[in-house]
Image (tube, rainbow, N blue to C red):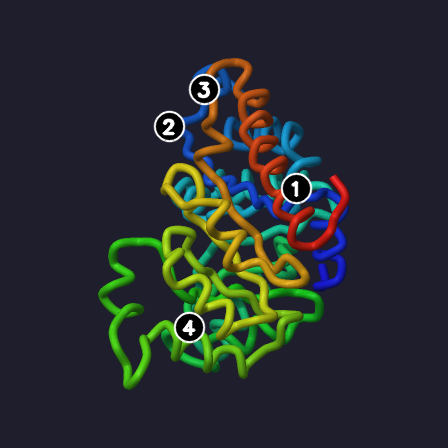
Amino acid sequence: MNRQELVNLIREKQSYLCVGLDTDIHKIPKHLLSHPDPIFAFNKAIIDATRDLCVAYKINTAFYECMGIRGWESLQRTVDYIPSGIFTIADAKRGDIGNTATQYAKTFFETYRFDAVTVAPYMGKDSVEPFLAFSEKWAIVLGLTSNEGSKDFQMQRVGEGYLYEKVLKTTMEWGTPDNLMFVIGATQTAQLGEIRKLVPHHFFLVPGVGAQGGSLKDISAVAMNADCGLLVNASRAVIYAGNGEDFAQDARRAAQEYQQEMAAYLAEKLAVKQ
């Protein structure tokens, strides 16, 4: 999916919601466990309930990889089931160089046909460039994350700024706003406004809303740009909104609350009709 298609989708749905399918077999409703593929059965129900309310689905591959071949099969079925025209993200946080990075890119862009993959930039330019070589695909580079450990490296001073600022400035030179996004944690609202000034045109993937406490209102106020420029991810707050047989309806209600709030911010910022 190219940038203009993503922007059009956001305007059409009045939403910049990304639903995280971080599906833990130990947390899904018990009645699904008798299904031949309980993970996919859960994901299918969530997708059916939220597909008109979100513009993206993010699959954290760790929840699938840990199950071996069965997990990869669940992942494949899930990706295949997501309707065309919805942005798909492999949250894999890969970071290696040369031929290895190229194989990772082929895994998620050719074998599983995701639109985007999260990438760790610690090893430098040659660990990110292979992901940028694919037409209408995206590398989503870790910029400033929400976890406590972000203080260990990302928030360390480097010269007159912080290390995460150096990462953002340098990485921007490797790609364009058409193929490069950044992960910016929702709980880092104190920095979000300054980051938007530093990175005015790129999309941000913003995890940390909902269960982690990030404020959708604050994020939207300081980080939205002329094309929206945001994919705000909610995982647990949506997919585990309920755990009974009507879990999908509960997930829909949670997603709808986000979408309606987003529609209001889009109307205010981008003059999108509600």
Quadrant housing residue 167: bottom left
Residue drawn 50% across the image and 72% down it? 197
Q: In the image, residue 182 lies at what x, y percent?
A: 50, 65
For disc 1, the marked residue is 263
Helix, strand, or loop for circle 4? Answer: loop
Q: Left or right: 267 with respect to 151? A: right
Helix, strand, or loop for circle 1? Answer: helix
Which image quarter is the C terminus in?
top right
Closer to the camera: disc 4 or disc 2?
Answer: 4
**Res 108 seen here:** no
Residue drawn 53% across the image and 78% down it? 172
Rounded to the nearest angstrom, the CA distance separating label 1 from label 2 is 34 Å
Residue 230, compared with residue 52, is above or below; it is: below
For disc 3, the marked residue is 243
Q: Which mark is residue 26?
A: 2
Helix, strand, or loop for circle 2? Answer: loop
